[in-house]
Amino acid sequence: MSEPSARLKKDLTRHVKERVIEAILFLAAFVSVFTTTAIVYILVSESWVFFQHVPLGDFLFDTQWTPLFDDAHYGIMVLLSGTITSSLVALLVAIPLGTIIAIYLSEFAPFAVREIAKPFLELLGGIPTIIYGYFALLFLTPLLQKVYPDLPGFNLLSAGIVMGIMIIPYVASLSEDAMRAVPMALREGSYATGATRLQTALWVVVPSAISGIASAYILGVSRAVGETMILAVAGGMQPNLTFNPAEPGATITSFIVQVALGDLPHGSIGYQTIFAAGLTLMLLTLVFNLIGYYMRKKYREAY
Amino acid sequence: MNQQELQALRAMIVAHKRWDTLFGVIGILALMLGLMTFAALFADMAINGLGRISVDFLTSFPSRRAANAGILSAWVGSVLVMLVTAFAAVPLGVAAGVYLEEYAPKNWITDIIEINVSNLAGVPSIIYGLLALGLFVYTFGLGQSILTAGLTLALLILPVVIVATREAIRSIPQIIREGAYACGATTWQVVSDHIVPYSSAGILTGVIIGMARAIGETAPIITVGALTFIAFLPTMPFTGELPAGPFDWLFAPFTVMPIQMFNWTSRPEAAFLSNAAAAGFILVLMTLAMNGLAIWLRYRLRKNIKW
Amino acid sequence: MNAMTDRYETLLPLKAEARNLSFYYGNFQALKNINMPIYEKKVTSLIGPSGCGKSTYLRCFNRMHDLYPGNRYEGAIDFHPDHTDLLSKKVDPIEVRMRISMVFQKPNPFPKSIYENVAYGLRVRGENARSVIDDKVEAALRGAALWGEVKDRLKELGANLSGGQQQRLCIARALATDPELMLFDEPTSALDPIATASIEELITELKERVTILIVTHNMQQAARISDYTAYMYIGEMVEFGVTDQIFIKPKRKETEDYITGRFG
C-alpha cells in the first residue's frame, strides 16, 4: 500500500490526464463547427465586398452574366438557369430509375441479386466525376448527335443525363434503405389480403417509406445542384440564359471552375464573384439539406 | 366459393400477376442500364486509352506533344496530397467520432456538432475549394501547395471518417465497456484499449472510402489553384542545390491525376484525348480498387462479428 | 372423411382439413404430420406453450410461409367445398389469401386513412366503384363493431386509433372481402383487458358468418370463445376435440398437465 497522499497525487494526475484527453477529443469534434463557420465567414465576407460594387438588385435581376468583360454584368439568373436546367435533366433520369431500382431491390429481387447489386451500385457511386464528365463529352454527346445532329458539342442535355446516372446510386441506395426499414408486419398485412408484390410495394411499402424516399430525392437534388466537373467538361462554360437543355450553358459551379482556372488577382472583383456565386450555391444546397434533414428525422420517428 | 367464382378469381390473379412480371422485367432493365453505363464507360476509356499506357506514360512529365506526355507529376502529386489528407483526416475524424460516441454529453453543443457533421456531408465539394482558397491560401498563407490541397480534401472527407468511426463504435456492445469499467479502467483506457482497437476494421473501411473519394476530387483542387501543367517534381527532402528541408515538399506547386485528365480532356487534339482516356482508366482502376477493398473489408467484417 | 374426423362423432360440415401436414424451415421440421378438421362456422382455437408451432401451423392456411425463402410444406390442407389443396404448388398463394383472411398479433394498420385501410382488400381485387366500396367498408366496420366510433372520422389515419380500435380496424380489413375462413394469430396479446373482451365478443359474433381459426396464448380465452380446441406441443398435434371436453376431461395426460398448469 502506498501512502495516502501519494495515492491522492496519482489520482489527481490521472484525473488531469483524462480531462486533457477529453478536451483534445472535443476540439477534434469541434473542427466541424469551425469548418462550417469558416465556410460562412469566407463566403459572406468576400461576397460583402462584392456587393459593395454590385447592387443586390442587379445580381438578382440582371439577365446577363459577363463579369470578366469590360462591360461587366452580374445577373446570377444566367448561371442559375444553367444549374436548374442541368439538374432537372439529371433528376428526370435519376428519380424514376433510382426509385424503380430501389423498389426492385427491396421488394422483388432474390437475395443473391440484391447482394451483388448493392455493392455494384456503391462502386458506381464512387467513380470520380471527372470520369463521368469525360464520358458525357466524348461518349454520350456523339451518341446523341447521331439521333439529333443539331446538338452542339457542349450541351446541358448530355451533361445532365450523365449527372443523373451518377446520382442513381445515391437515390436508389437511400430509397432502398427507407423501404427496408418498413416493418415486415405491414407487408404481411398486405399480402394476407391477397395483394401481389407490386400492389404491396406501391400501395403499402412506398407510402410508408415516403419521407425517407423524399429525403433521398432531396439529397439527389443537392448533389445535382452542387455537381461541378461533369458540367465544366461537357456543358460548355458560356453563360447562357436558357432552359433548353440542348444548348450549352454555364452553371454556378462550372463558372467557379472557369474563373479558378484563369489567373485572377486576389482581391479583384472577378475574384470576388466566385464567392458571391459560391454563397448562392451554398444557400441553395443548405435549403435542400435542411429539408432532407427534417424528413429523415420524421421518418426515423415513424417506427 | 363455387367453381364459377373460383374461375373468375383465378383469371383476375393471372391478370394482376402480369403487372408483377412486367415490373420485375423493368427493374432488371433499370439495373442493367447502370451496368451497361459502367461497361460503356470502362470500355470507352480502355479502347481509347490502353494503347497509351506504358512505363513511359507513368514516368514522363506532361508535354506539348501528346505522344511524349505522361502522368509522372500527376500521380506523384496525387500520392503526396493523399498522404497529407490521410495524416490530417484520420486522427481528426477518429478523435471526433470517439468524442461523439464515448464522451459527448447530451446537450446543445453536441447537437450543434452533430448537425454540422451531417450538414457538411452535403456541402458541394467546390464550396470546400472556396473555403480553402480564402482560408488556407490567403488567410493562412499556405499558398497553392500540396499542403493546402491535402488539408482541403481532409476537411471534405472528414464527415465520412466521422460517420464510419461512429458506426463502428456503435456496433460494440455495451457489456464490453461495462466489463472494462468494472476492472477500474478510466474512460480513456476503455477507449484506447478496447473501443478503438475493436472498431479499427470499420474505421479503416470508412477511411478507404473517404480516400477513394478524395483521390478523384477535381473541383476543390482546381479552385485552390493547382496548376494544370507541371513538368517537375517537388524536391525530395535533403536533396537539391540548397538541400531541401524535410517538409519543403508540402509547399511545392503540384498537379493531381484528375486535373491532368481534365486538362487533356479540354484540349481539342484527339491525341490528347487518348492521354485523357489513359489517365482516366488508371484513375478509375485506382478508385475501383479502393472502393472494392472497402466493400470486401466490410463484408468480411459482417461475416466475422462474434459478439 | 378420414379416420381422424370420424372420432369426433359429428356430422357437421367441414370447412378445411389438414392431412399429414408437415412443415420445414430449411432443414428444421417445425410441424410434424398434423391431421385436423376445421368445422364450418365454428371457432377452433390452437393452444400450446410458446414455440409449439401453433402460429406456424396457422400461417400454413394462407401460405404466409411462401413469403420467405427456404420454407417447405408436406401433406395437404383440403379446403371445402371445392376441395382445393391449399398447399399445392399449383395453387397460387394469392388465391388462397383472397379466400382466407388474417388478423395479426400486433395491430398492423397501413399508414392510410381508416377508410382506405378497410377498402384495401377491395382495391387489391381491382374494385374501383366508389359506391360498392362505400357499402362494403361500412358493412365491414359495422361487422367489426367499429362503425359507431369512426363513422365521422373515416379520413383520419388508422394509426390515430387506440390499440383495441386498431385491432378491430384490422378485423374490418380482413372482413371486408367476405372471407371463407378467418385466421387470428394471438389477436389480443398486445391489448389491455377491456379491449380484449371486446375482441372476444366480436369473434363470437363473427362465427355466425365465417369460420374462424385462432391461435391464443391464453387458455381461458380458448375456453371462452371456441367450439373446438387443439393442443399442440413441439410441432405435434397432441389432442383435438370439443372445447369443453378438452378442458374438462382431456384424453391425453400431456394435455391435462398443460391445462392444469403443471407444465407450460
Image (spheres, rainbow, N blue to C red):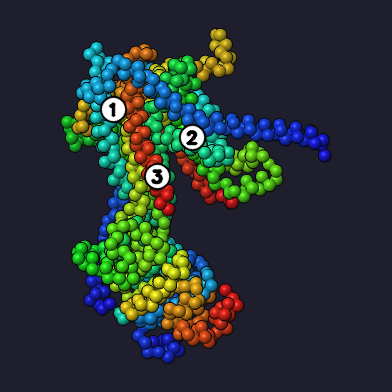
SS of the residue under disc 2: helix
Q: Is residue C145 left or right of residue C132?
A: right
**Mark 2 residue type:** Ile
A15 in relation to B245, above or below: below
Residue A164, given in percent of the width and then of the height, sits at 30, 38
Instruction: State the residue in front, A301 or B155.
Output: A301
Q: Chain of mark 2?
A: B
Q: Quickly name the residue at label 1.
A: A251
Quarter-of-image position of residue B70: top left
Rounded to the nearest whole Å, what is the CA distance between mark 1 and mark 3?
Answer: 29 Å
Residue C7, given in percent of the width and then of the height, sits at 45, 89
SS of the residue under disc 3: helix
In front: mark 1 or mark 2?
A: 2
Instruction: State the residue in front, C98 or C242.
Output: C242
Give the residue at x 41% y 56%.
A183
Instruction: State the residue in front, A193 or C131.
Output: C131
Task: Give a yes or no on whether discs 3 and 2 share a subunit.
Answer: no
Question: Residue C158: which numbered mark, if any?
Answer: none
Question: Residue A296: which numbered mark, if any?
Answer: 3
**Mark 1 residue type:** Thr
Residue A261, given in percent of the width and then of the height, sits at 35, 19
| Quadrant (top left/top right/bottom left/bottom right) for the N terminus of chain B | bottom left
Question: Residue B113: which numbered mark, if any?
Answer: 2
Instruction: State the residue in front, B95 or A141.
Output: B95
Give the residue at x 37% y 89%.
C11
Residue C8, given in percent of the width and then of the height, sits at 44, 88
